[in-house]
Amino acid sequence: MKRGQSLWPAVMAWIGIITVCSGSWAGSAPPSINLPALGLEADSITVSGLSSGAFMAVQMQVAHSATIKGAAVFGGGPFGCARGDGTMATLTEAAAHCQNLVGMPWNPISSFMGPPDTLALMNGAQKLEEQNKIDTLSNIRKHRVFLFSGINDTLIPQAVMQALENWYGKLMPASQIETLFDVNAGHGMLSLQGSVPCPVTRLPYINDCHMDGAGRALSFLMDETLQPADKEKGRLFAFSQRPFVPNTPTRDGMHETGHVFIPDDCTAGESCRLHVAFHGCQQNQFFIGNRFFTETGYNQWAASNRIVVLYPQVSAAPLYNPAGCWDWWGYTNQDYLNRDGIQIRSVRAMINQLTSLPMESKKQPAQKPTGQFASR
């Protein structure tokens, strides 16, 4: 197999099959509110994600490690995984060492050829640090990370997540890394509201393993005992993402609409934290409706612990991203994983809005968002 060999036909065929099986795309719904300025704590932001969203969470954490303090990774992989030992991400590298696909030229049954070289990936990250394209890697020493990989996950092999654990181990103490690698789960988010049997991998990738992944992750990332709310004391809103997407000639892949869960306390002037949750492939609203925003368990924990949850979205595009994945292999451009990446810049702008002060004053209650609620 040659590095850089074109995999578009095989990958597009594979993604196209699962895309057709998942249902047709729908038109974009109008946003319900403008994303508000809530004065959220700007130095305690955490992120998480599943699948492509897990890769994106790692990229976001590393690019902005000065302000993002931790990441929960559900079935993802190391920073720069698709770049291998080079400086350019390729689908070849992604399919061979970061995930397991069918229909690849070198093996139609299983594309995975072994985990990535974490030393090479660390060298790549250090070069980006030297070029000032990511924050100082030493920031990560103070972070906390939660890593989940299901034993029955055939899409992202456990060896890839073990490589991520090894990658983090080069930057931070083992006591600040929590792993959950012994659950007989498929590729999916652990949720008490999950509809997929635990060992199965299928839409909507929210699995019932009698475990609360969001609660486990948030409690570890924030290093405190959190309690979920008996009732969601907050609301989920839709908002337009377009004002936060830089106007560049590069394809951005961003969806028109994002979502945000805001606890009632956070509109009443209380000090609140921010968590960003990235969906996986085939998990935006056109594939599974609002299920990622309402059934993954984040909102119940957020409501009783003064945590605003931002749910940004990317869209599906027939030619280059038909499954609606976050960019972790360079479909936008080769800056996808650093501070100049169009998706990272877009999400960073949303974070800046939520952490900025309301116009009236931080001492006064923040203005409640108005408009039609996306969900109750």
Image (cartoon, rainbow, N blue to C red):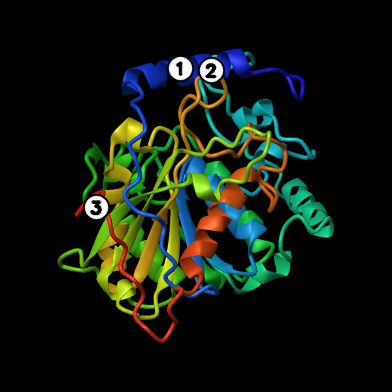
Residue corresponding to mark 3: 373
Q: Which marked residue is nearer to the observer: mark 1 or mark 3?
A: 3
How packed mark 3 is, by other alpha carbons closer than 10 Å (few <14, some 14-19, many 20 or more), is some
Residue 208 position, x and y percent, is 24, 45
The image quadrant of residue 88 is top right
Q: Is residue 233 visible?
A: yes
At horizontal 45% and vertical 57% (from top left) the residue drawn is 276
Q: Nearer the viewer, mark 3 or mark 2?
A: 3
Q: Which residue is mark 1?
A: 16
* Residue 252 appears left or right of 20: right
The residue tagged 2 is 12
Q: Give the residue type that dot 2 points to.
A: Met
Residue 279's place in the image compared with 358, above or below, is: above
Label 1 Cα crowd, 10 Å radius (few <14 / some 14-19 / many 20+) = some
In this view, the residue in front, 135 or 183, is: 135
CB contact under 8 Å: marks 2 and 1: yes
In this rendering, the answer to whether 232 lies above or below 313 is: below
In terms of secondary structure, where does tag 2 sit? helix
CA gap, disc 2 and disc 1? 6 Å
The image shows residue 36 at horizontal and vertical percentages of 41, 63
Q: Earlier in the sequence, mark 1 or mark 3?
A: 1
